[in-house]
Amino acid sequence: MGRSPDETQPLINGEGGSKQNYSNPYGFLYPGSGSVSTLDFTGEHEDQRVLTGTNEKLEISDQPLDKVKKIDGSDEHKIGQILATAICGNDITSSIFYTSSLCTASAGIFAPISLGIVCVVLYLFRKVYGEVGSALPLNGGAYNVLLNTTTKHVASLAAALTMISYMATAVVSGSSAMQYLSGITDKVNVYWATIALLGFFALLNLVGISESAIVAAVIFIIHMITLSILVFGGFVSFFIKRDFEVVRQNLHGQWPADYSLDKIAQCEEQNYFGKNFAFNIYFGFGAAMLGVTGFETSSNFIEQQEPGVFPKTLRNMWMIVTFFNPIISVLSLMFVPVCDIAMNNTGVLASVAEVAIGDWFKIWVGIDACLVLSGSVITSYVGVIGLVRRMALDRCLPQFLIHTNPWRKTTHWIIILFFVICSSLYMIVDGNTDTLAGVYTVAFLGVMSLFAVGNMLLKYKRSSLKREIKSPWVGVVIAFFSVLAGLVANIIRDDIIVYYFGIYFIVTAVIILTMFIRAKLLKIVLFFSQILLSGNAKLKASVFIGDAVKRINSQPIVFFASKDDPAYLNKAILYIRDNEQTNWVKIVHCYDDENPPVPALEENIHFLDKCYPKIRIDLIKVHGPFTPSTVEKISDIMNIPKNFMFIACPRDQTYPHSIGDFGGIRMVFNV
């Protein structure tokens, strides 16, 4: 199971052996006929020879296995509820520094209502994410759920959105953090300090996620203390001073007496001015949706979290946002004129802190803003590491990305490349992150909507899949259309963001999709090489390109078949052919004394092997029950990662194992 098919089977058009007959340069397209083999997990022998092209019976000892390994490969770095919440919480709570201003600019005095509606939508998404994470507890977020409900191509486009979101988050948050720091001390060069910050957190992630999470937890605790002082201290200060003048002016749409004519003219240019309450609430809702950015992050490193932690992180984030976002908006309107809030994109909380509590707390809030926005950079690193690693394991991205260093077992290439890309992007825009902020808006809302779509597909196509959390259909539909409404509001408000988003998305999508068609591209190169070259150069090109295509297609794919229905088997072959780059499929059938092998399986596999000359189809009969332990043994013996193993989604919810118990195998269709 660990060698290329052409080592044991003759090519249909050529000679046998490991050398191809290059009289036909396209001979590599035909991997030869399949074979039938047997694994017996009940014997006492320790023979673990690799079965390829034989009819031998292989017996291995029935020794107990260690725990089932996740395909992520980082089981030793599990984190608990506090650390996981801190990683996500820094991102979702840092948005309060600009959401209050953005929402007020569109909603005016109705901003707290818009923010409250977003909290209701977030509660629905808490159920949406919880159900998906319960049914498919694997890294990848929207990519993971769409991978198991649609095609790999569709899932990869969702992943492209997520990567753009993380990239923009890292750059925008890092730059904003350094801007706050420069407001405290003029010795900071924002441009180079931002690049240094990105590099610092790259080093932290090279050390390991646990260590990064500890730093994130410290930042998160400081931030929660700061927001608590601001809220409780602000309300106490308001009722002690009993100064209702600002509140009265805001409620009646009056300008403060010290406003100049130019200032009034600027206020009248704000989005909220002169609009009715429905207009204000709707566009305020669109802006307020940015206040929940980071909620999707937890699903991208779910495998690094201890069992049961994922739904708790969702609950914690929802509770924090529901408490702080609307109430801080109310507090702002109590101390600061609505126009000043709308025109102050980054310093609203600092202004409120200064008026309500004092200058010293304004400095405190500035330091806290710097820290928590820096924590958002950690979130971006952690999220993108989990997502890119999963995509590389699935061969959607180059394989070198999954290499780990021997020191800390971290995926150094992902971390280094993410730092290089973010730093280069920041240099390209010359420190102006306004464009990236718009790209971030569309990418984030796109990811949220695709996650809702994935949940609906999970309900429809994988309804029998075991899950501990279930979200009602009506809640998922409302959540989906709410996000679409928010996306439309942001596009109407600033339609140029679609143009810039399109550029970033197309570049990212092209890189990913190229991985899917690289074998076809090589075949095109081979075709033209046969026309343009001659003699020895033509032969060398054939050998080189043929070997390259064979390396791409040499990854065996396993499908665990429970019955011999030819339509059922053919459906699996078609899915694998359309979604995986391989020409070698191994049909594995598990049986035991109580459930003997299905009678016509071998005959039907032989027939399908002839129907697909460009795919070698092997049958391996395994004497053993279909359990996570058996799958782990098969993965070890065949040297095939579990993310290249497929099953049909079981219809019986009484099946004792969930899909997460198997550590990464994928579903192709319902039984």
Image: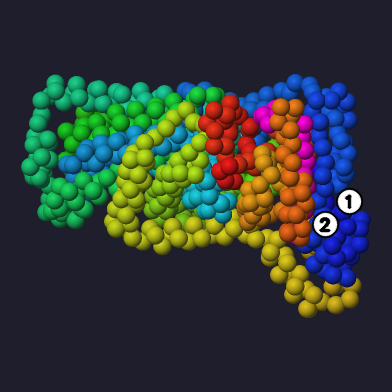
Q: Earlier in the sequence, mark 2 or mark 1?
A: 1
Residue 112, given in percent of the width and then of the height, sits at 22, 37
Q: Residue flagged by tag 2: what amino acid is it? A: Gly
Looking at the rendering, in which quadrant would you find the N terminus?
top right
Looking at the rendering, in which quadrant would you find the C terminus?
top right
In this rendering, does residue 141 appear at all?
A: no
Horizontal placement of 317 versus 527: left or right? left
**Helix, strand or loop at mark 2:** loop
Choose between 136 and 462: the one closer to the eye: 462
Q: Residue at x 43, y 44 (%)?
A: 456
The image quarter in which residue 324 lies: top left
Residue 529, given in percent of the width and then of the height, sits at 78, 73
Point out which mark residue 8 bears. Answer: 1
Q: Residue at x 61, y 27 (%)?
A: 77
Q: Is residue 528 above or below residue 590?
A: below
Choose between 23 and 534: the one closer to the eye: 23
Horizontal placement of 418 versus 319: left or right? right
In this rendering, does residue 50 appear at all?
A: yes
**Helix, strand or loop at mark 1:** loop
- Label 2 Cα neighbours within 10 Å, binned few <14 / some 14-19 / many ≥20: many
| Residue to which mark 2 is pinned | 32
**Residue numbers of the magenta segment:** 614-630
Q: Residue at x 14, y 21 (%)?
A: 240
Q: Residue flagged by tag 1: what amino acid is it? A: Thr
Residue 420, given in percent of the width and then of the height, sits at 58, 49
